[in-house]
Image (cartoon, grey):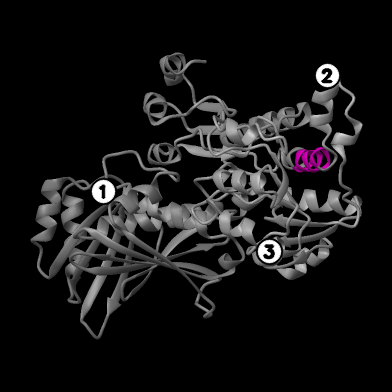
Amino acid sequence: MKPEELKAVIKDYDALIVRSSTKATAEIIEAAVKLSAIGRAGAGVDNIDIPAASKRGIVVMNTPGGNTVTTGEHAIAMMLSLARKIPQATASMKAGKWEKSKFMGNEYCDKTLGIIGLGRVGAVVADRAKGLKMNVIAHDPFISPEVAEQMGVKLVSLDEIYANSDFITVHSPLSPETRNLVNADSFAKMKKGVFLIHCARGGIVNEKALYEALKSGKVAGAAIDVFEEEPTKNMDLISLDNVICTPHLGASTDEAQTGVAIAIARQIAAYFATGEIKGAVNFPSVSAEVMFAIRPYLALAEKLGTFQAQLLTGAIQEVNIEYSGEILSHNVAPITISLIKGLLDPILTETINYINAPVIAKERGIKVVESKSSEVKDYTSMIALTVKTSKETSTTAGTVFGKNDLRIVRINNFSVEIIPEGHMLAVSNDDRPGVIGNLGTMLGDNKVNIARLHLSRDTDAKHALVVLNTDSAVPANVLEKLRKLPHVISIKPIKM
């Protein structure tokens, strides 16, 4: 669909799945009033405006493993074709020539292959290259030597890759750190007559430097599938006799395209059916099994945030979240996001969800600090939330009893055991006789029924905290009367 066609109909859809050509721009996303999810049938998400999607609360998913084998196999095919000059020989024969002596090739058996980036695709390339009896070395700052050794690969520095490789293949992701990673200085360190294979992302290899290295003979040949600009206009580079190239075909096989289509369809379906988030690029991925295990803590965290937000005065500046106990056996990142969502929801008019909560918190300058404590607490698992505002610092903590019974167990210096649901009143008062009686009488006289009551005392400070659950909201005029009762310091209505 053309952009204007997509924009005209996207308002009716809950999800959008794209491949590489469709652009999910900010303008399209703005028009997609019902959209909850965008899926990319493939790995690259350059065609999706992720910040715009995140701000709107739209989860963005991809299928990074769906074309791993295909892309790795393409790199091997490019290497073999480059070494034996198969494309050049094919073009010569199609032109009616028989130039056998012109296309003398190179063997790859017993040669050294240097892999830059030993991720999913790099690992496939290493496995296939070992089958070709090549000596495989690799550089990847995120892979341990032990993991590389299990693959039968020696992990070395980038300079060692350049100095010792007969063939070099690039499989790093494109990032600010890897842009122009292979540059003029890199080529100067390489063996004369090296072959370069590039099937990763355009921009990692500096095309101008590669052109000069090919012209000088430092690089004997290059096989390129990706370019700095696509479609490429760099005809000087691709016109060289010692360059073979393909138009970004790494993932282009029937099997891979079918595989990623099925994968992203299943991911989108699971997201709507069970809440499972897999392959998300703007939210921690959560399997159905993990989601089942952490769901009570997601609910607890959101309620802690919502409860705390209604107690606070002043603009939120910093949020500190401490986890302790059995909860530490899980990835707590989604729980943190749930808490931020709960904290922001009561104070903002815009819709807050799990996807846009971190974005909005960052936009508002709220610092979020997450910590984990090995200290044994009074509960099997506990979440403690401390919020600093422009006027105060306040702490609440909560836990889960049994499987799903949520409790707030601490409010600042007060130990409590509160069920966070429905209409509530948090009353701070002097620890004097008659306060609770006055509260009950005033509520009763105004037809407000108390469902639960919890009292906690700070005997040193001679203060008390009363938390009431009521069957209905307390009217504003009744709140004013309650605030004027003797020894009442403050009253905060809370709606959970």
| Distance CA(mark 2)–CA(mark 3) | 45 Å
Identify the amino acid type marked 2.
Lys
Mark in the foreground, 3 or 1? 3
Q: Is disc 2 in contact with disc 3, using a CB cutoff of under 8 Å?
A: no
Q: Which residue is drawn at the image coordinates 60% and 39% (left, top)?
A: 62
How far across and how far down the image is residue 369, in percent? 40, 66
Query: Dot 2 corresponds to which residue?
Result: 94
- Whether residue 435 is situated above or below residue 54 in the rendered picture: below
Mark 1 Cα-neighbour bin, 10 Å: few <14, some 14–19, many ≥20: few
The disc label shown at residue 347, or none: 1
189 or 365: which is nearer to us? 189
User: Residue 396 is drawn in which quadrant?
Assistant: bottom left
Q: Secondary structure at mark 3?
A: loop
Range shown magenta: 72-82
Mark 2 Cα-neighbour bin, 10 Å: few <14, some 14–19, many ≥20: few
192 or 437: which is nearer to us? 192
131 or 161: which is nearer to us? 161
Identify the amino acid type marked 1.
Ile
N-terminal label among 3 and 1? 3
Query: Dot 3 corresponds to which residue?
Result: 143
N-terminal label among 2 and 1? 2
Q: Is disc 3 in contact with disc 1, using a CB cutoff of under 8 Å?
A: no
Identify the amino acid type marked 3.
Ile
Q: Is disc 2 in contact with disc 1, using a CB cutoff of under 8 Å?
A: no
The disc label shown at residue 95, or none: none
| Distance CA(mark 2)–CA(mark 1) | 71 Å
How far across and how far down the image is residue 360, in percent? 34, 48
Q: Secondary structure at mark 2?
A: helix
Q: Secondary structure at mark 1?
A: loop
Q: Which residue is drawn at the image coordinates 34% and 38% (left, top)?
A: 351
